[in-house]
């Protein structure tokens, strides 16, 4: 953060300061909400026709709800609970656990904190040793007792995989559970994210429940936007240029040539867009996680349970390289995701990380699809009758959170009257995006000398 963090912003006019927020993702919407509560005049500019950024849902003509990749909301997220009406979202909850799909059969692993009657079954799970279960249980318990701030306040300085090795958890429990589960959370199959991220996510998954809104993840930003004055949200308004005067942003110019003056500016966009608007290098040197979510439809259930299926990959010399990190029959959890009589499955495939200015080579879709089909069919032969619907491929889904990631972020306040917010400067999660938006709003209010 720059040294002018505490510098006061003097309103150059007698009217309330005009704050422009670029981007109607979760961080931007949370920021707008706080400014609205404080009585600040603001305007949000969003290039798309709907809010949400990377959190959105497509409703197909046939009636399928296709999320922008497999995402869930945890009811243990404190900021989400504060800003959202969860019941209004019509939450559909996953069971807390997973299905472990191995060559010698499937095992149901349920979190005894949420399913106490499954405690003995969890202890008896054959996919990993009793020692590993006890070690992970004690470790998770120690994180539950810690505050979120103490966990995320500073980097651990070692990767999640290094943390697991330190704990002696680099055997079957990693290959059969932790890698496919948390690899899907981090979008990093190597578990290279800083151990602080793992500790936080482990706590939230252990303590909370994962849910999907009945109308898709896009219902989350839709609800946030519905609480804001509609005349302050402009969709289809792409910001082309920042106009500067004496080291400050004085206006933004839209793609259509319109110029809108502002006293303060908040960039709640993706990192690439922020860097472009700032005229900075298109690359910070950070790696980005790329992911494909493939959607399939069928007529009959593939398995029972509102659970994620984790294909076992083994460990060490026995580790298998798989395309599919995990998959789930979404309609087991959310019947509303498919039209009546149909089902919807999502399969997550991770790609190698890429630089902020590059792309991975796109493989032939048919070859790629054939490999994914073969892996799921080997576990569930009846999957052969299912049809491919759509691939959602996100080039920059999450920034790398490897040790040192805090230092590689862009500056949060690169100009005296300009702030960046969202996962470009914060941890990569739904709750962190919301928290980042609120924190940015508080900094703006401090500079405006408004009570809060």
Image (cartoon, helix red, strand yellow):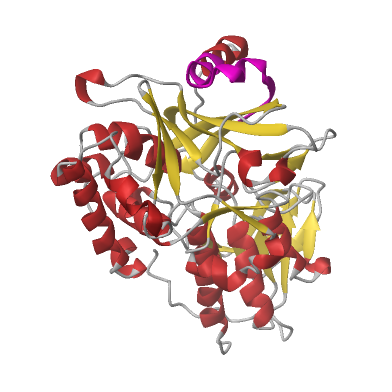
Q: Position of residue 383 (x, y in %)?
A: 60, 20
> Is 381 in the magenta?
yes
Q: Farthest residue toward the bottom?
A: 451
Residue drawn at the location 25% of the way across and 36% of the way down: 128
Q: Observer-nearest residue: 26 or 179? A: 179
Q: Is residue 119 left or right of residue 52?
A: left
Dominant SS type (magenta)? helix
Q: Position of residue 422 (x, y in %)?
A: 52, 57
The C terminus sits in image quarter: bottom right
In this view of the protein, can residue 267 be seen by the observer?
no
In this view of the protein, can residue 105 be seen by the observer?
yes
Q: Is residue 179 left or right of residue 370?
A: left
The N terminus sits in image quarter: bottom left
Residue 401, compared with residue 314, is above or below; it is below
Q: Is residue 301 left or right of residue 171?
A: right
Residue drawn at the location 56% of the way across and 37% of the way down: 304
Q: Observer-nearest residue: 246 or 61? A: 61
Q: Observer-nearest residue: 180 or 359? A: 180
Residue drawn at the location 35% of the way across and 22% of the way down: 104
> Is 325 in the magenta?
no
Query: Which quadrant holds residue 273?
Result: top right
Counting labels gives: 0
Q: Position of residue 203 (x, y in %)?
A: 36, 59
Residue 38, compared with residue 151, is above or below; it is below
Q: Position of residue 246 (x, y in %)?
A: 57, 65
Residue 234, compared with residue 228, is above or below; it is above
Residue drawn at the location 69% of the way across and 77% of the way down: 36
- The stretch in magenta equals 373-392
């Amino acid at each position: 953060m720059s040294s002018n963090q505490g510098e006061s912003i003097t309103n150059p006019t007698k009217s309330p300061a005009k704050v422009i927020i670029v981007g109607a993702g979760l961080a931007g919407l949370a920021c707008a909400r706080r400014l609205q509560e404080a009585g600040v005049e603001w305007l949000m500019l969003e290039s798309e026709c709907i809010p949400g950024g990377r959190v959105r849902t497509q409703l197909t003509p046939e009636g399928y709800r296709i999320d922008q990749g497999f995402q869930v909301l945890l009811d243990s997220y404190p900021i989400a609970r504060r800003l959202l009406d969860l019941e209004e979202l019509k939450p559909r909850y996953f069971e807390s656990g997973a299905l472990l799909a191995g060559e010698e059969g499937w095992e149901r692993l349920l979190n005894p904190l949420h399913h106490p009657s499954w405690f003995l079954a969890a202890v008896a799970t054959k996919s990993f040793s009793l020692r590993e279960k006890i070690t992970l249980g004690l470790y998770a318990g120690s994180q539950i007792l810690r505050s979120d701030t103490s966990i995320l306040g500073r980097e651990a300085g070692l990767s999640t995989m290094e943390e697991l090795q330190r704990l002696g958890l680099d055997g079957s429990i990693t290959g059969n559970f932790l890698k496919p589960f948390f690899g899907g959370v981090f979008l990093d199959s190597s578990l290279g994210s800083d151990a602080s991220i793992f500790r936080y996510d482990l706590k939230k998954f252990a303590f909370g429940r994962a849910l999907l809104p009945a109308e898709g993840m896009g219902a989350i930003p839709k609800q946030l936007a519905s609480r804001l004055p509609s005349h302050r949200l402009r969709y289809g308004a792409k910001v082309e240029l920042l106009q500067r005067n004496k080291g400050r942003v004085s206006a933004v110019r839209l793609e259509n040539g319109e110029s809108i003056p502002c006293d303060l500016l908040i960039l709640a966009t993706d990192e690439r867009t922020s860097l472009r608007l700032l005229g900075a290098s298109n690359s910070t040197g950070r790696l980005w996680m790329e992911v494909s979510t493939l959607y399939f439809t069928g007529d009959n259930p593939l398995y029972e349970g509102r659970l994620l299926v984790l294909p076992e990959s083994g460990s060490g010399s026995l580790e298998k390289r798989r395309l599919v990190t995990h998959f789930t029959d979404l309609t087991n959890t959310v019947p509303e995701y498919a039209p009546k009589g149909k089902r919807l499955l999502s399969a997550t495939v991770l790609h190698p990380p890429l630089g902020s200015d590059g792309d991975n080579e796109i493989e032939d879709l048919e070859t790629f699809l054939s490999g994914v089909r073969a892996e799921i069919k080997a576990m569930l032969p009846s999957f052969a009758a299912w049809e491919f619907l759509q691939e959602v491929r996100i080039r920059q889904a999450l920034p790398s959170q490897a040790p040192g990631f805090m230092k590689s972020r862009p500056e949060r306040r690169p100009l005296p009257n300009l702030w960046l917010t969202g996962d470009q400067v914060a941890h990569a999660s739904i709750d962190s995006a919301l928290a980042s938006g609120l924190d940015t709003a508080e900094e703006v209010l401090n500079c405006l000398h408004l009570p809060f």
